[in-house]
Image (tube, rainbow, N blue to C red):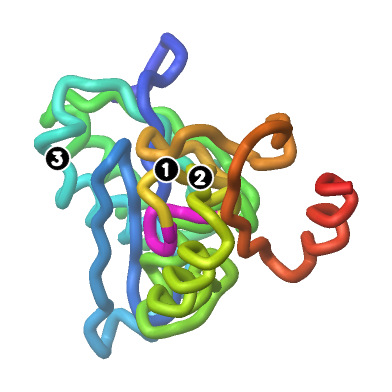
Amino acid sequence: MPFAADPPEMLLFTDAFKEGWGAHFLDSTAKGRWVAEEKNLHINVLEMMAVQRACLELVQRLRGNTAALMCDNAMVVAYIKKQGGLKSKDLCNLTLEFLEWAEMKQIKISARFILGKRNVLADGLSRMGQVVGSKLSLYPKVAKTRIQKWGSPVIDLFATRLNAQLPVFCSPVPDPVAAFEEAFQHPWDNLDVYAFPPFRMLRQVLNTVR
């Protein structure tokens, strides 16, 4: 089976929702919608289907590489790690089918569980047309006028590639396009920034500014 003995070289984040699926790998993203009959499937099955479709979409970039699947569904992670399972026949069949396909494509696979709040980019891609935490931002025209009025910030501190207001941004999750991760883990001294943080972080932002 195509399991990686060495530490994964690259991370593939996936997510499934009742309307569709989303994924990102390095600087590439992929997403799609479920057809009517697929929407009624168990969420564990949809999460595994999201992994399959993400890899199919990104196969040219994955081929010949080692990848860690980052998924916020513990059952899917367990089935990939154990190469199947006994609780769900459908999930087991999908897992074996995926691992055989990955081996054929020379893709080495490992799987890791990630908290949903850390899977914001894939989460945003899967929830088409819905406002989620990773998508919250000022309307671009409003942000542009604020930026022009207050100066020339060099970095957007709380963003993903889906909603960044500046070319340079800090992401809450690993993303090779981002300048760095986790805004609060880096000093803000002498740094001209733009910040539209999640509302739950407002107090922490104010304390950091002080």
* 62 part of magenta stretch: no
The label shown at residue 155 is 2
What kind of residue is marked 1? Val
Residue 122 rendering spot, x and y as whole percentages: 42, 57
What kind of residue is marked 2? Ile
Q: Which stretch appears magenta?
A: 159-165
Residue 201 in which image quadrant: bottom right
Q: Are marks 2 and 3 in contact (CB under 8 Å)?
A: no
Q: Are marks 2 and 1 in contact (CB under 8 Å)?
A: yes
Give SS at disc 3: helix
The label shown at residue 59 is 3
At x 66% / y 61%, what residue is drawn? 197
* Dominant secondary-structure state across the stretch colored magenta: loop
Residue under label 1, please give it.
168
Q: Is residue 125 left or right of residue 208?
A: left
Give SS at disc 2: strand
The foreground one among 98 and 8 is: 8
What kind of residue is marked 3? Val
| Structural distance between the alpha carbons of marks 2 and 3 | 32 Å
| Structural distance between the alpha carbons of marks 1 and 3 | 28 Å
The answer to whether residue 85 is visible is no
Residue 173 rendering spot, x and y as whole percentages: 54, 43
Indicate the quadrant containing the N terminus: top left, top right, bottom left or bottom right.
top left
